[in-house]
Amino acid sequence: MEYMLNKTGAPPGTIVYSGKDTTEKVRITLIEYNETQFIEKNFYDFSECLESVDPNMVKWINVDGIHKVELIEAIGKHYNIHPLTLEDIVNTNQRSKFEDYDSYVVSIMKMIYYDGEIRSEQLSVILMEGLVISFQEIDGGDAFDLIRNRIRQGKGRIRKVGADYLAYALLDAVVDCYFTILEKFGDRIELLEEELMEEPTKETLKQLHHMKREMIFLRKAVWPMRELINNLERSETELIKPSTDIYLRDLHDHAVRVIDTVETFRDLLSGMMDIYLSSVSNRMNEVMKVLTIITTIFVPVTFIVGVYGMNFDFMPELHSKWGYPLTWFVIIITIGSLLIYFRRKKWM
Amino acid sequence: MEYMLNKTGAPPGTIVYSGKDTTEKVRITLIEYNETQFIEKNFYDFSECLESVDPNMVKWINVDGIHKVELIEAIGKHYNIHPLTLEDIVNTNQRSKFEDYDSYVVSIMKMIYYDGEIRSEQLSVILMEGLVISFQEIDGGDAFDLIRNRIRQGKGRIRKVGADYLAYALLDAVVDCYFTILEKFGDRIELLEEELMEEPTKETLKQLHHMKREMIFLRKAVWPMRELINNLERSETELIKPSTDIYLRDLHDHAVRVIDTVETFRDLLSGMMDIYLSSVSNRMNEVMKVLTIITTIFVPVTFIVGVYGMNFDFMPELHSKWGYPLTWFVIIITIGSLLIYFRRKKWM
Amino acid sequence: MEYMLNKTGAPPGTIVYSGKDTTEKVRITLIEYNETQFIEKNFYDFSECLESVDPNMVKWINVDGIHKVELIEAIGKHYNIHPLTLEDIVNTNQRSKFEDYDSYVVSIMKMIYYDGEIRSEQLSVILMEGLVISFQEIDGGDAFDLIRNRIRQGKGRIRKVGADYLAYALLDAVVDCYFTILEKFGDRIELLEEELMEEPTKETLKQLHHMKREMIFLRKAVWPMRELINNLERSETELIKPSTDIYLRDLHDHAVRVIDTVETFRDLLSGMMDIYLSSVSNRMNEVMKVLTIITTIFVPVTFIVGVYGMNFDFMPELHSKWGYPLTWFVIIITIGSLLIYFRRKKWM
Amino acid sequence: MEYMLNKTGAPPGTIVYSGKDTTEKVRITLIEYNETQFIEKNFYDFSECLESVDPNMVKWINVDGIHKVELIEAIGKHYNIHPLTLEDIVNTNQRSKFEDYDSYVVSIMKMIYYDGEIRSEQLSVILMEGLVISFQEIDGGDAFDLIRNRIRQGKGRIRKVGADYLAYALLDAVVDCYFTILEKFGDRIELLEEELMEEPTKETLKQLHHMKREMIFLRKAVWPMRELINNLERSETELIKPSTDIYLRDLHDHAVRVIDTVETFRDLLSGMMDIYLSSVSNRMNEVMKVLTIITTIFVPVTFIVGVYGMNFDFMPELHSKWGYPLTWFVIIITIGSLLIYFRRKKWM
Amino acid sequence: MEYMLNKTGAPPGTIVYSGKDTTEKVRITLIEYNETQFIEKNFYDFSECLESVDPNMVKWINVDGIHKVELIEAIGKHYNIHPLTLEDIVNTNQRSKFEDYDSYVVSIMKMIYYDGEIRSEQLSVILMEGLVISFQEIDGGDAFDLIRNRIRQGKGRIRKVGADYLAYALLDAVVDCYFTILEKFGDRIELLEEELMEEPTKETLKQLHHMKREMIFLRKAVWPMRELINNLERSETELIKPSTDIYLRDLHDHAVRVIDTVETFRDLLSGMMDIYLSSVSNRMNEVMKVLTIITTIFVPVTFIVGVYGMNFDFMPELHSKWGYPLTWFVIIITIGSLLIYFRRKKWM
């Protein structure tokens, strides 16, 4: 799990990629549409892409990879994007945030997915007049296929409305990802809970701790996401039409619900730690009882037999005919009364 | 206990039912009234229902079941309800919320009931001019029979005032349900507390944990409920007349009281976990003491008798006449002084 | 300790008494005064009381008992009090609150007293032009005798000023009750603390838990009380003259001080739980040490004497003259070095 | 440590001293100064003091003792001070507060000092046009000697500016006292921490608890102090000149720093409780290990020697020449392998 | 780790150095630049420095050492800086803060660095028209070399813009230091976590505690830093041009991210304490089990062999031929069934 990496000391406005090293080619996907038309093309060169752009359609430029700083700079230059925005896009250690630069608004957030453990990828969405540019860290496997299909098929509202609705749809898809992860997480919690109730092992503890850490990680991603959406909703940008406002409110509700769920899970995990500890101490208690019962029963009678193992010349009991059976009698009485005592104490 | 389910990826405004599968018929109940008249009818078809509607009376349309999406859509179309509202109504994983769409206001909330464990059902209440539409997840057993009776009998204020008061009455009934549940919960807490004080078992711990989880669940339902009522109270909609304001304030007080009680129960349950743990450790202490007393008394004297069980040729004590009685004397002195020591330490 | 009782489902505005059943007569006490005159009378009938009322004097009508709903309704009708207010007065499960109904303001609060454990009684104070009506749950033993005496004797400010000052004085007396209880509580905490430091028993734990619960109960009563006073202070009602404002500010300070003290006590009680647990574990430690020392000293030497209790034909040591004394020597050396070891470890 | 004492039931505005009983004479110190002149006199009578007052100089009247209520009333009457203010001055259970009464402003706070444990004394500072009146609970040993010296010597700013700066200087001295106490406290924490790390005893726990209580006490004093300064800073009184504002801001910063330190100490003390508990459980672990090792080594071999202590007629081993040495061999092997096992488990 | 030191009782506005004693010479570095020119000079005398100042260039005066109070006073006098500002600069126990004095704004903060443990140094930055004055506690090893290089080389934005951007750049460098420290801290946490999971020792606990303390220390430094930046961002000073605003917003985001990380680390460290405790109790459990198994197996069979070690004259078993082998059989059966019992209990 990455907590934070940083480009200490670089001057502000310096566009330095801070993610993992990679030499993959960066794919640019251009989708243009209006109510009647639809075009979808892939490029590996921004200038080619520009030639295909039709000013009369809503445009969505999706950039799959942010390690090619020159490309980001070229896009930034063409669309007049502030260097600080570009810096934020390529710095993968960004906190989710929303910024309003009059001519465009930018939302930077963490898109999460699950492959064995929870991972995150940075997504930046720039909304301009009639244009959405989205930057993803990694090519492939994004959450936007459903949106693409709806655009392709012209189903629903999306082709009838502007770029602001597209930007909203992207954010909505990201929030939906959180739900998917949380659903899986909920299942894991339920499994772990059963395990804890029945037979907790050291492995259970490890897993519990692991999930707690993931929850800390998720919380750190989720709260700024809500803030972002909140700021977006309250911003007075003219790029977002009033008709989209209600969708943003809905999105905000979703984000709040994600946070609610994260907090609920946190509470559940804390409670589970308590159960673990009390079940461990319960078991210790049981072990102690067995130890105590055995010791308490056999130590006194061992003393008794020890007495008659002594070699004194003058021990009258040793020569009595009833010495041996009486000793057994005493032993059995002792053990019997101890057993009754333990039963009463509910130790057995 | 359900935490969250979701319709990941579906486009916003898509009306998809997300509750449990069911093929039951959906019953529509129309209640119309004014100060002098009262009509109550059941339908299984919305168009039939529409024919019966009298524009001069206050109307309450109650829909028992939200799995028939087409019906919801038909109602939505007829009354000009925004697709997002309809989506929220059928999505049973909704967070309680209040929305003001000028021509109508909608409150979506969780109605809770108890059958072995706490369960919840989603209720949506739409208030329009002279009309209340309520959508329930499940047919039967709702909390509204009292309200229906008051309308039927024309008792109290309800027949004299408008639809806004009806909507308030529905919400008030929902909040009252919370009180009923909490009352039961309070009894269970008291029982559990006595059990804990007297003789906690593993079962007590399980139950304690179960109640803690239910409390987490309740909290998650209760806080948004209060928020909803708060927003409703503060909303500037003209659908709610000033004369109803004071009732909303009262409703708000009730919601706050529910939250107070939930938080008090949470505190009590936390305190009970502490008692459980300290009573377990107390018991362990007791077990330890028994073990220690027995061991401490018998181990030294077993050593003494061991000494005289040795077979050395030259052990003068063995041949003394007083050897055996003196050994017993030493043993009794040892045991006696240990007992006095333990008494002083208050271990016995 | 009562947490909450409720009149689920009754229509709002229905005046239903929710306290304990009682058939006692309800006493109405009328006190009228101005700077020069003073009248005090008892009635068991409201209409009789009304005849005695003098419009030119400040009037205080105190109703001792709220189980006679008809009486409350009669008062409500005469003085034009809203049904919701009346409902709140007789519903003893009310949260403390302040409401401003233009023609009157009403404060409903919990008056606490101590008889073995902390109990509460509901008090409602209605302030109108020249009139204060107070409703108490139980007849007798209230906190207002000092105020009555001051009115009777005409001492201090109270006879010179209006009804608003009288209402303030009642609230101040209620807050003073909290101080009295907290003072007693503080003494109990100090006693308990000493007990904990010296010799905690299971009884101490029970008491600690009991006090924690009482604290939860007190907190639940105190915070709304402060809210009430805050709302009262900020309200813009004309019933309260500017000259009384400064007294309300003082009252607010007192309420804050009560809360401060409650929170301090809560902190102290939490800390005491910690001490209890660590003192229990300390004692366990001590028990363990005794066990370990005894076992560690006697188990090895018991082994040694066991060796020479064996019956082998060929054991040269047994026949040596020095065998027995040497064995004792080894035993004493062993015990001695173990004792030194334990001293070094600071176990003894 | 006093938590709270109270004058329950006394009518508001009644000036009743609530501190410890004392019959000491009350000393009044009058200091008058302007840029060029300086007068300092002691009185035991207020009317004498009044005669010495020069209207053209800044006056500081310091009253050492508040148990002589008549004196306080005389001062109050002369300077037109509201009875509630006087009540607050003599009631030593006051919460720190600031009040603005147009013609004067009053700050009441706790001055703390250390003599074995942390104690507090109430200080009230009234600022009027050209006059500061300060009331201290106890004569002698206050924190103001530095201020007096600066006035006497005419050093620094103080003689050049008005009474508002003097009032500020008094408050600043009080906040400085908190720093002194906290400094000492920090040293004690560091000592305790070392003790905890090395060798915690029951005494350490007691001390830790004692310091936690003192911290609770300090917090209760410090937060209202900050509130006071905050209210003072924001008040719109004309008694405080704009040139003094910047000093108040600085004072506010100091108060925040005191709170920061208190909170840091609280965190440290909580962490120390954790260390204590884990060091106790660590030690218990160590004790357990010793017990287990000794028992596990000697119990099995004691069994072995027990076997050959039996007196059966037919035990062939007893008559073999190698029986005894072989038994020793088995004993040594057993002990040896157990030792190796423990080493592997890292118990030794 | 220093928590707090103080110059109790000194009059406000007294400029007293409160850091560590030192007699080093104080170096003054003057850097002047505009888009085309660049001058850098070192002085040990302020008046010399003043002669070199060019009014047409942006000036950065960096003072390395604040123990020479006369120098600070000379600078203060020349540039008309308020005595309280000067006091704050030399008082190294300052809380981070931002103050706006019309003609200049001052930011005082903690610059942290790591040499074995986390240390802090106070930095004060005064921004005036065309001038930045920075005061550092210690000469050498600051975080500003990157900024100096950028000025020297004329790279980036810095030479083209004014003094406000320079002040921002200094603050940004300070925040970057926090990131560097946190990165190192993150690595240490990960190492510690692995240690905890595998084999926690007493040393691990000590380290864990040490890191917790450092975190408390860092938090105390970080939160006021954010407040400072927040105040700076919101201040309405005309010294900061609108074009710099966006950089301040970015700086604010960075500060929030630092806090996020600190809080995440705090959560992680708390969770680690839990793991430590549960791993200790797990291990104790294991020890207990070994003890119990050994005791439970050998104590009963030792009793058996004790029985036949008794010396009674009449013990028929002793003379039977099968006595000895049967005893062995009973012993083996006993041990065997106990082993099976333990296996079933999963203790082995």
Image: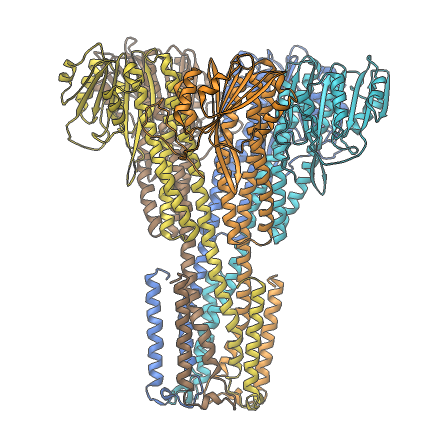
Chain colours: A yellow, B orange, C cyan, D blue, E brown
Residue A72, compared with residue C3, is above or below; it is: above
Q: In the depicted view, which residue is nearer to us: D241 or A26? A: A26
Residue in the image at 74% along x and 35% along y: D21
Q: In the depicted view, which residue is nearer to us: E231 or C39? A: C39
From where the camera sits, is residue D154 visible? no
Residue E130, compared with residue A274, is above or below; it is: above
Residue in the image at 44% along x and 42% along y: A270
From where the camera sits, is residue D226 visible? yes
- Residue E211 in percent (x, y) is at 38, 41
Q: Quadrant of the C terminus of chain B?
A: bottom right
Residue D236, compared with residue B31, is above or below; it is: above
- Residue A275 in percent (x, y) is at 46, 48
Q: Is residue C151 left or right of residue E224?
A: right
Q: Residue furthest top?
A: E56
Q: Quadrant of the N terminus of chain B?
A: top left
- Residue E188 in percent (x, y) is at 32, 41
Q: In the depicted view, which residue is nearer to us: B2 or B254? A: B2
Q: In the depicted view, which residue is nearer to us: A199 or A305? A: A199
Residue C241 occupies which quadrant of the picture?
Answer: top right
Residue C80 occupies which quadrant of the picture?
Answer: top right
Count of marks overlaid on the render: 0
- Residue E65 in percent (x, y) is at 36, 26
